[in-house]
Amino acid sequence: MPLYDFECLRCQRQFEAFLKMRETPAALTCPECGAGNPRKLVTAFQTNAWSSFLDDMERRVNPQKFK
Ligand SMILES: [Zn+2]
C-alpha cells in the first residue's frame, strides 16, 4: 500500500496518508481542520530512494538473484 504526501488546501497542513488502489484523495480528510480533497504532493525522489534502498537490501539478502 503506497504512502503519499498530501497538502490541505484550506490550512496548508502537510500530512502523509496511505491510499488504497481505488481510493482518491477526495476520500481523505485533513487531520488538522477536517477539510476534504487534499492536494497530492509529488514524492518521486522519495519513492526512488526507497526503491533503490529495497533493491540494495535484496542484493545483500539474495546475492544470487542478481548475478
Ligand atoms: Zn486542513
Image (spheres, helix red, strand yellow):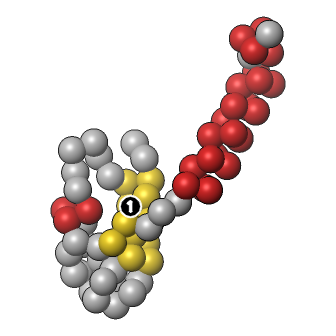
Dot 1, crowdedness within 10 Å: few (<14), some or many (≥20)?
Answer: some
Residue 56 position (above or below residue 61) = below
In the visual, does 47 lie left or right of 5? right
Residue 6 seen in render: yes
x and y percentages locating residue 67 in the rendered image: 80, 10
In the visual, does 57 lie left or right of 25? right
Classify the position of the N terminus by image quarter.
top left
Residue 3 position (above or below residue 59) = below
Residue 61 position (above or below residue 16) = above
The amino acid type, in three-letter code, at marker 1 is: Ala
Give the labeled residue for mark 1. Answer: 17
- Label 1, ligand 1: CB separation under 8 Å: no
Q: Looking at the image, which is closer to me, 15 or 66?
A: 66
Q: Secondary structure at mark 1?
A: strand
Q: Looking at the image, which is closer to me, 48 or 16?
A: 48
Residue 31 seen in render: no
Q: Quadrant of residue 21?
A: top left
Q: Quadrant of residue 55?
A: top right
Q: Residue at left 52%, top 60%?
A: 43
Q: Residue at left 20%, top 75%?
A: 36
x and y percentages locating residue 2 in the rendered image: 43, 47
Q: Residue at left 22%, top 72%?
A: 37
x and y percentages locating residue 18 in the rendered image: 37, 54
